[in-house]
Image (spheres, rainbow, N blue to C red):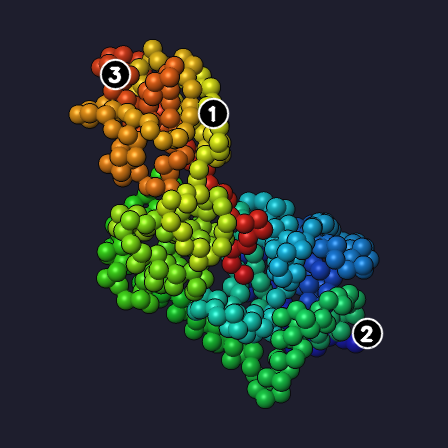
């Protein structure tokens, strides 16, 4: 074993010192420990920097390599030597799509499930990883947000993710590991050039490094500029969104299309991405945004087009653009569809018995319940056991206060109920007579009198959640 360079040792300690406030304030510190060189350097240096009793090495066993069990045992033994708590989480990696991405999603999901409020997970990404990430995202058409690279810190569920070594290059970590006689594992998959990141790491970046030895610093500077540009984009988008007549809808949000059209194409696209992110959704990609701006918004007025992406969907109705959770049906981006192909249809059920006062589970995953009221809603005398059904065609109703009855299709149009809800509206029957339509209205003759007890209907909507394993941010 050779003695580590004082300079390299100091660089690692200085990097940790810069993150001291986050380390000191954490309830508990988890170290993402793969057993490789980088994460071993991080674990070893942290063991000298903070009280080891506050540390837990979290190893994720992807169960892909035949050596995965040996790696987990190696990590356990290293932690025993260092006097650090060790935890191994086994995950199942999806066989769909990119194995790189699937393994990453499974890993981050394991982190999020383990960490509690106020906990911190520390990862060993360094400057060379940052350069690789920015190059990779550049080739995948990322904008300023993606080209800003990996942040030093960000939220991860109820916890926080920290990357204290992001300013150090690989050579610093290599010398630290050699000088301290660390033992690490080599994952053979890191040499497999069929994976995009490995191809960049072993084929492209060495050539860049030979021509531009300080490439990582240059890319880091560019990432900072992109981060600043993204901050400006978000500030502009917030100003634009404030002028869009934003409205909370039954399910999701909407803005006025005429106001959106007053913006330039670039500001429209920027606004849609920010709008999605501000409502907790992964922003749609370039192709989805283009489809919204150039197809959905220009579709004929008598159509109800939809554009989906894995974390939501856009719809348009009566001069408003709706941002909605992903509904049932295929989730292909650029899936422009007509309103007649309603994807929120209730299952083909005859009727559902309902004792008003109980919560009724609806076929699409929504619920129907009722709150006791005085002087409004459905009269109490009709509130025993009723039947709930869904549209089959030909239903008529006279809403309280309306001059005459009409079929539901006409009434829904008058009420401006969005087309994608119409086949899912629970219809409430007393005997064989329609007495109420969801929480929209009570039919004439069945309402509570001024001092009479009644029931106010409450229809709660259920949408398909985002794709499993989705990870926000880098």
Neighbor class of circle 1 (other Cα within 10 Å; few <14, some 14-19, many 20+) is: few
Mark 3 or 2 closer to N-term? 2
Q: Quadrant of residue 283?
A: bottom left
Horizontal and vertical percent for residue 137? 52, 70
Task: Locate residue 117 relative to residue 94 in the image: left or right.
Answer: left
Q: Depth check: 285 or 245 in front?
A: 285
Task: Locate residue 3 relative to residue 290 in the image: left or right.
Answer: right
Quadrant the N terminus occupies: bottom right
Q: Depth check: 174 or 437 in front?
A: 437
Q: Residue placed farthest to the front in the image?
A: 394
Q: Quadrant of residue 334?
A: bottom left
Horizontal and vertical percent for residue 234? 36, 61
Relative vertical location of residue 377 with respect to residue 270 in this rendering, above or below: above
Q: Depth check: 80 or 208 in front?
A: 208
Residue 350's disc is 1
Label 1: state its secondary structure: loop
Residue identifier under label 3: 445
Mark 1 or 3 closer to N-term? 1
Horizontal and vertical percent for residue 351? 46, 23
At 47% from the left and 19% from the top, the residue drawn is 353
Task: Locate residue 403 relative to residue 174 in the image: left or right.
Answer: left
At 76% from the left and 73% from the top, the residue drawn is 178
Q: How many marks?
A: 3
Q: Depth check: 61 or 353 in front?
A: 353
Task: Mark yes or no: residue 370 visible.
Answer: yes
Residue 1's disc is 2
At 31% from the left and 56% from the top, the residue drawn is 299
Label 3: state its secondary structure: loop
């Amino acid at each position: 074993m050779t003695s580590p360079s004082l300079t390299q040792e100091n660089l690692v300690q200085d990097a940790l010192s810069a993150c001291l406030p986050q380390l000191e304030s954490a309830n508990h510190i988890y170290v993402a420990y793969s057993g490789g060189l980088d994460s071993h350097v991080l674990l070893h240096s942290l063991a000298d920097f903070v009280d080891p009793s506050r540390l837990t090495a979290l190893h994720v066993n992807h169960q892909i390599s035949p050596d995965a069990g040996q790696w987990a045992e190696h990590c356990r033994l290293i932690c025993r030597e260092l006097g650090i708590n060790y935890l191994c989480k086994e995950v199942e990696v999806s066989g769909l799509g990119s194995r790189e991405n699937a393994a990453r999603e499974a890993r981050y999901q394991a982190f999020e499930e383990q960490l509690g409020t106020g906990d911190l997970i520390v990862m060993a990404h360094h400057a060379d990883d940052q350069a690789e990430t920015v190059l990779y995202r550049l080739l995948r058409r990322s904008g300023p947000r993606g080209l800003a690279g990996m942040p030093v810190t960000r939220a991860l569920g109820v916890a926080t993710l920290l990357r204290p070594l992001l300013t150090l290059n690989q050579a610093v970590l290599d010398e630290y590991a050699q000088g301290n006689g660390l033992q690490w594992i080599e994952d053979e998959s890191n040499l497999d050039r069929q994976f995009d990141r490995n191809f960049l790491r072993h084929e492209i970046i060495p050539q860049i490094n030979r021509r531009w030895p300080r490439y990582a610093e240059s890319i880091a500077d560019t990432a900072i500029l992109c981060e600043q540009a993204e901050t400006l984009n978000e500030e502009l988008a917030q100003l634009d969104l404030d002028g869009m007549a934003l409205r909370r809808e039954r399910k999701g949000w909407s803005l006025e299309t005429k106001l959106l059209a007053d913006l330039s194409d670039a500001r429209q696209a920027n606004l849609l991405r920010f709008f999605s992110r501000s409502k907790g959704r992964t922003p749609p990609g370039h192709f989805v945004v283009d489809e919204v701006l150039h197809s959905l918004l220009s579709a004929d007025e008598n159509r109800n087009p939809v554009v989906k992406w894995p974390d939501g969907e856009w719809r348009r109705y009566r001069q408003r653009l709706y941002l909605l959770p992903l509904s049932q049906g295929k989730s292909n981006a650029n899936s422009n569809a007509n309103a007649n192909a309603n994807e929120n249809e209730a299952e083909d059920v005859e009727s559902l018995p309902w004792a008003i006062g109980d919560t009724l589970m609806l076929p699409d995953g929504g619920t129907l319940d009722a709150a006791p009221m005085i002087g409004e809603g459905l009269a109490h005398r009709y509130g025993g056991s009723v039947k709930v059904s869904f549209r089959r065609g030909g239903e008529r109703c006279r809403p309280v206060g309306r001059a005459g009855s009409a079929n539901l299709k006409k009434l829904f149009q008058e009420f401006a109920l969005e087309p994608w809800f119409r086949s899912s509206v629970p219809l409430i029957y007393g005997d064989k007579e329609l007495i109420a339509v969801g929480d929209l209205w009570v039919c004439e003759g069945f309402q509570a009198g001024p001092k009479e007890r009644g029931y106010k209907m409450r229809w709660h909507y259920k949408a398909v959640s985002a794709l499993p394993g989705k990870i926000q941010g880098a």
